[in-house]
């Protein structure tokens, strides 16, 4: 009798019934269909990390790389967990908006020299039980339409460390707190394919010290974001990649825009990825990056409105 084929609660209930009516003890095997098993897994949720994970490591690169500070106007909207606006998981942390029910920011560490390949099969998307359910958007948004559940902290980036750590990070990445809605071709568009490969492009183009990188990213919340199923859908996303090259700390910022006017049609516009300044991200998000990241930022002269979108990794200015 294995954990995959037996539900402990059902088994205990059956045993109680047998003892109450005097029936003889017998071996019980409760077999689940795939759907029932998945529902049981989803109800249990992924491994909780509230007591065991330190989350995003601000000293990962040798310099203190802090997550951004929330502006005064959005600070009251952040979800507090144990008195902190930061929620920790394995290798990543985030700050969650009460009103928008998505993360303001997610910060994660990547150890490029220790990455593992792990399957995502049978890992359900679930809400984090440490956070009130009303502050999280679940599967009710994604059923029967063209929206995908997109990871903010990229799953593949988190799979490093010991095997136990990598497995915990793999599972933790599927909490809905780390998910935002993305169009179903978000990872198929030619230009947006670059968005999903920015970290890979960095490792390919730059001699990153110790193959260690810290990344901070999230959605841009706008008052005019489209409402779908009573949820405002972010259409812009940002990402800041921080690394050392030759002992010098560098931070490079990017912005992605996606067209959300095509949820019920097949005619999709191309996604656009821009390299931008930290100041532009701060203006769009009401976040404030630390002086360390500000000093390390790649200088850019023109805002995204005056710049051409990136066509490929060769267009990126890393330092």
Image (cartoon, rainbow, N blue to C red):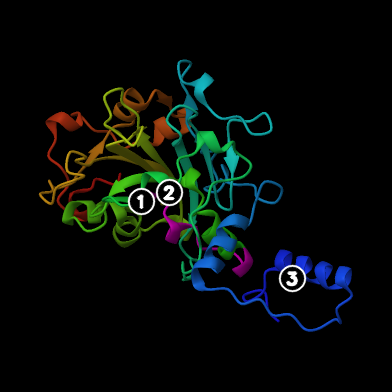
Whole-number angstrom distance, CA of label 1 to CA of label 3: 32 Å
The C terminus - image quarter: top left
Q: Which residue is mark 2?
A: 139
Q: Which callout, 1 or 3, points at the residue further toward the start of the chain?
A: 3
197 to the left or right of 33: left
Q: What distance separates the C-alpha of mark 3 from that of mark 2?
A: 29 Å
Determine if the magenta segment contains residue 153: yes
Q: Is residue 297 above or below residue 1?
A: above
In the rendering, at what x and y percent does residue 314 appear?
A: 18, 54
Q: CA distance from mark 1 to mark 2?
A: 6 Å
Q: Mark 1 against mark 3, which lies toward the viewer? A: 3
Q: Which residue is mark 3?
A: 11
**Category of crowding for the residue at label 2, using alpha-carbon neighbours closer than 10 angstroms: few (below 14), some (14–19), many (at least 20):** few
Q: Residue furthest left?
A: 267
Depth check: 289 or 27 in front? 27
Residue 227: where, in percent of width, then height?
A: 30, 31
According to the picture, the residue beneath numbered tag 1 turns out to be: 143
Q: Residues within 10 Å of mark 1 (few under 14, many from 20)?
A: few
Find the magenta span and give its range: 150-164
Residue 45 can be seen, yes or no: no
Seen at 55% across and 58% down, the residue is: 42
Q: Residue 224, percent across and down?
A: 26, 24
């Amino acid at each position: 009798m294995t954990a995959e084929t037996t539900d402990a609660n059902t088994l205990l209930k059956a045993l109680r019934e047998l003892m109450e009516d005097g029936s003889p003890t017998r071996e019980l095997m409760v077999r689940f269909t795939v759907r029932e098993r998945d529902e049981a897994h989803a109800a249990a949720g992924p491994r909780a990390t509230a007591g065991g994970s330190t989350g995003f490591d601000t000293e990962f690169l040798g310099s203190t790389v802090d997550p951004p500070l929330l502006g005064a106007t959005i600070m009251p909207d952040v979800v507090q967990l144990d008195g902190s606006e930061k929620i920790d998981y394995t290798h990543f942390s985030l700050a969650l908006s009460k009103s928008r029910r998505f993360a303001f920011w997610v910060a994660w560490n990547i150890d490029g020299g220790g990455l593992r390949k792990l399957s995502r099969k049978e890992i359900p998307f679930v809400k984090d039980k440490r956070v009130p359910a009303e502050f999280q958007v679940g599967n009710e948004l994604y059923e029967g339409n063209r929206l995908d559940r997109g990871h903010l902290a990229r799953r593949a980036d988190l799979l490093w460390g010991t095997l136990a750590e990598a497995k915990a990070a793999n599972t933790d990445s599927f909490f809905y707190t780390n998910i935002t809605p993305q169009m179903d071709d978000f990872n198929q568009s030619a230009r947006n394919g670059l968005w999903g490969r920015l970290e890979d492009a960095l490792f390919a183009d730059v001699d990153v010290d110790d193959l260690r990188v810290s990344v901070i990213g999230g959605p841009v919340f706008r008052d005019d974001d489209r409402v779908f199923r009573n949820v405002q859908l972010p259409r812009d996303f940002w990402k800041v990649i921080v690394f050392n090259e030759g002992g010098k700390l560098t931070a490079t910022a990017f912005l992605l825009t996606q067209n959300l006017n095509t949820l019920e049609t097949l005619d999709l516009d191309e996604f656009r990825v821009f390299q931008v300044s930290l100041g532009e991200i701060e203006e769009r998000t009401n976040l404030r990056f630390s002086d360390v990241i500000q000093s390390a930022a790649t200088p850019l002269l023109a805002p995204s409105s005056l710049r051409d979108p990136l066509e490929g990794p060769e267009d990126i200015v890393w330092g």
